[in-house]
Amino acid sequence: MRLLLRIFPLVLIVVGATLLFERPAYAYADPGTGLLAIQAVGSALVAGGWYLRRKIYSLFHRDSAAKVETERLAIPEDSEG
Amino acid sequence: MEMTFRDPAGQLLLTRDDALRRVRAAAAEEARAFLDSALRRDLERSGDLVASEFVDVGVESANDPASDAGDFWLRHPRIDPISYPWEWTPAQWCTAAELTLRVACKAIDAGWTLKDATPLNVLFDGPRPIFVDVLSFERRDPHSSVWLAYGQFVRTFLLPLVAAKYLSWPLEATLFARDGYEPAALYRALPRWRRLSPALLDVVTLAALFEGKGAKPQKAKPATTHPDLAAHILRKRLARLGKQIRSTVGQENKSQWSRYVQTASHYQPADIEDKQQFVRDKLAECRPARVLDIGANTGTYSLMAAAAGAEVVALDSDAAALERLWRSAGGEKQPVTAMVANIARPTPAAGWRNREQLSLLDRLTGGFDMVLMLAVIHHLILREQLPLAHIGELCASLTRRWLILEWVPPSDPMYQEWLRGRDHLYGHLSERDLGEAFAPHFGVTGRKELGNGRVLLLFERNDSGAGTA
C-alpha cells in the first residue's frame, strides 16, 4: 500500500502531462476526434507503465537507484501499455 | 483515369506503361529528403515500397496551369491490373494492413512517419502487397507520441474487417466508404456484449463515447514527450493494431465453392485428369504471356498457367475459394493476382465523378492473350440469364487471341440443378449454339469431350491473323 501511495501521484502527473502536452491534430488524413482521444489515453497508459516500472525497480534496488536515474531513458523491452 | 487530386503534396497519373507522380513544390523538400534516405532504400530493397526514379516530363505537362517551377516528377513501375480493397479477400486485407504497419514501424525507427494509412496506398503485385505512395512519408516530430494516421488506419483497415466479421457487412461495401467506417457507426450496430470485447473496447466503444462527448480539436501546444518514450509509445500502438487486425481476421474461411474441387461429384478422376491435360497442352502450345482466369475457384488452372510462364489475373466471386488460391500463389511465388469479382456484375468505377477508381472492365479489357472460362458458362446462362452472343462479345473484348471454354451441356447435373423448370428457355442449348453465337469473334481450333459430357473448346479470335495453335 505504501508503495502504491508513493507512486500514485507520479502516475497522475505523467498521465496528465501526456494528455495536456500532445501535438496538435493537423493532418491531411482526418485524425478523428474519438480515435485521437484514444491515442492520448493509450499514450498515458504506456507512459505510466514505463515510469512505474522504473520506480518499482528503484524501490527494490536502492543501491542502484542513482544508476537507474542516469539510465532513465532506456526503455524496458517488456513494458506494457 | 485522371490525375489524382486529394493529396496536396502531389498527384499521380497512370500511363500505359508506368505511373507518373508530380510532387508539388510545397512538398518537394520533404519528398527529396525521403527519396535520399536510407529508409527509402531499405523499404525498396525489401520489396515493401514501390521503386521510384526522377524523370523529366514533356512540355505538355509543364504547360499545365497547376504546375509550379518547383514541382518535380517521379516514375514508378506500373502494377497491372490494379486491384482495389473492395476486391480483396479478408486475408489480403490483413496482409495489406500488416505491410502498412511494418512500413510505419520502420519509418518511426528512422525518424519518419506515415501521414496517411489507407488500403488505397497498397496494391497487390501478384500475391504480394506493395506500398505505393511515396508521398505518405514525412519527418516525425521526435517529441510526439501521436500518429496522426491512426484514425484513418482504424477507420479504413480495422473497422471494415470488424464489420465484416461481426456484422456481415461485406468488404465489397467499402467501395462506398472511401474513408472507412466511423467508430460510432459500428458501436450502434454491434451487440452490447461485443462492444466490450478487448479487441474492440478502445477503437469502437471508447472512441464512440469520446466522440459523443463532443471532443474538440486540440490546439497547438509544444510536444514534450521524451523522444525515446514517444517512439516506444508509437511502436506499442502499431503492435496493438497488428494484434487487433490479426485477431479480427482469424482463421481461413470456408464456403461451398472453396471445397468445390474436393467435393465435385460430377467429375470422375479420369475426367479431371483429361481436363487438366487439355489445358496444360494448350497453354504449352499457345504460350500466352497474360492469362485471365474467370471463375478461378481455388486456382488449379491459374497456377497451371502461371507455371507455364504466364502472368495471371484470377477472378472469382467466392472470397473463401479465392483466398485459398491467393495463399497457394503466395506459397509457390507465382505471379497470380487474385480479385474477388463477378464478371457478370463487374466492379463499377468509383470515387469523385466516377473517375478516381476504374471499373473492373476498364482494367481488364484487351489485356490478355488468353481467357480461361472453365465451368463458368452455365452460371452465366442460368444464374445471370445472359445470352450466349453477349458472353462471346465479352470474351472477345478481354482476350487478344485465345479462349479456353468448358461447355456444360443441359444434361449435366449442375446445369439441371439451376435449370429449375426453365427448360423451354435454356434446356435446348447445345455446343452448336455456342459455336454459332461465338462465330462473329472466334473460331474453334481445339476440342475435347470429357467422359461426363462436358466439352473443352479452344477458341481463337477471327482477327488474330495467325494460324491455329
Image: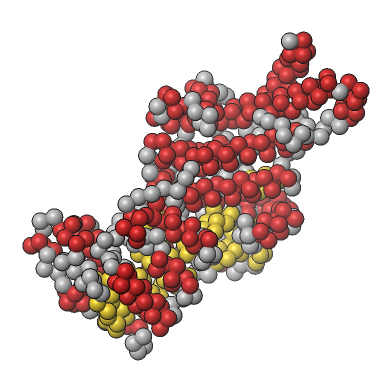
Left or right, B364 with respect to A40, comes to left
User: Residue sitting at 53 percent across and 25 percent down?
Assistant: B206
| Vertical position of residue B249 compared to residue B395: above or below | above
Left or right, B258 with respect to A75, comes to left
Query: Which of B103 and B120 lies nearest the eye of the viewer?
Result: B103
| Vertical position of residue B313 compared to residue B183: above or below | below
- The outermost residue toward the left is B424
Residue B287 visible in rendering: yes
- The outermost residue toward the front is B269
User: Residue sitting at 29 percent across and 71 percent down?
Assistant: B271
Splitting the image into 4 quarters, where does residue B134 fall? bottom right
**How far across and how far down the image is residue A21, in percent?**
71, 26
Left or right, B11 with respect to A61, comes to left
Total numbered labels: 0
Q: State the scheme by which the image is colored.
A: secondary structure
User: Residue sitting at 39 percent across and 68 percent down?
Assistant: B301
User: Residue sitting at 52 percent across and 39 percent down?
Assistant: B247
**How far across and how far down the image is residue B447, in percent?**
27, 80
Residue B405 visible in rendering: no
Query: Which of B126 and B243 lies nearest the eye of the viewer?
Result: B243
Q: Quadrant of the C terminus of chain B?
A: bottom left
Splitting the image into 4 quarters, where does residue A17 fall? top right
Left or right, B258 with respect to A38, comes to left
| Vertical position of residue A9 compared to residue B286: above or below | above
**How far across and how far down the image is residue B205, in percent?**
49, 26
Q: Quadrant of the N terminus of chain B?
A: bottom left
